[in-house]
Image: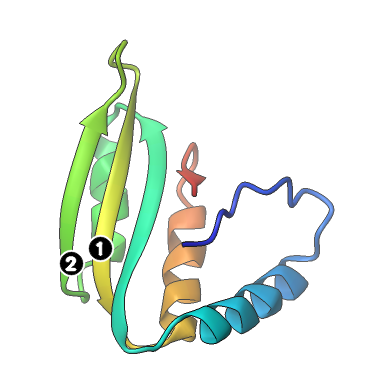
Amino acid sequence: MVNIIDNQENTNPDDFYASLKEKLEATHDFPEDYLFKFIITNDESKHTEIYRVFDEVKFTLNTKESKNGKYSSISINAFVMDADQVIKIYKEVGKISGVMML
C-alpha cells in the first residue's frame, strides 16, 4: 500500500502519479487484490461517493468508526488489473472532499 498523505503539497500531481506508477509496478504483481484505505468524516453520503468509485470493481469492504464517532476508516480490498487502474481509483476518490488516502 502507498501512503498518499506524504505531504505532497509542493509536488506536481503528474510527477507524483508517475512516481507512484513506478513504485506500484515494482512492488506488485498485477492483476491482484490491492488494499485501499481511506479516512473520512462519518457522513454516509461521503461513504457512498467512495463506494461508487468501485462500482465496476470486485471488492470486499471493511469499515471502522473512530472512538468518538466523528470519523470512519474504510478499507477496500479490490481486484485490480494494473497500476493504471489503481491510480485511476485514487484520482477519482481524490475528487471527494474531506477524504484522506493512506
**Label 2: how many Cα within 10 Å (few below 14, some 14–19, many 20+):** some
* Residue 59, numbered circle: 2
Q: Position of residue 99 (x, y in %)?
A: 46, 42
Residue 41's spot in the image, x, y percent?
Answer: 38, 28
Place of residue 39 in the rendered image (x, y in percent of width and height, measured from the top left): 41, 38
Total label count?
Answer: 2
Q: SS at mark 1?
A: strand
Q: Residues within 10 Å of mark 1 (few under 14, many from 20)?
A: some
Q: Of callouts 1 and 2, which one flags the residue occurring earlier in the amino acid sequence?
A: 2
Q: Secondary structure at mark 2?
A: strand
14 relative position to 102: left or right: right
Amino acid found under the numbered disc labelled 2: Phe
Q: Which circle marks residue 54 in the picture?
A: none
Q: Confirm whether residue 97 shows in the render.
A: yes
For residue 76, what is the image quadrant? bottom left
Residue 56: horizontal and vertical position, in percent? 21, 76
Spot the residue most to the right: 10
Q: Residue at x 61, y 77 (%)?
A: 23
Give the Cα distance between marks 1 and 2. 5 Å
Query: On residue 77, which mark appears?
Result: 1
Cβ atoms under marks 1 and 2 closer than 8 Å: yes
Query: Is 2 on the left or on the right of 14, as rendered?
Result: left
* Identity, as a three-letter code, of the amino acid under mark 1: Asn
Q: Looking at the rendering, which quadrant does residue 19 occupy?
A: bottom right
Answer left or right for 95 relative to 34.
Answer: right
Is 24 located above or below residue 37 in the figure? below
Relative to 13, does residue 32 appear above or below in the rendering? Answer: below
- At a point 46% along the width and 62% down the height, the residue shown is 1
**Image point (45%, 48%), residue name:** 96
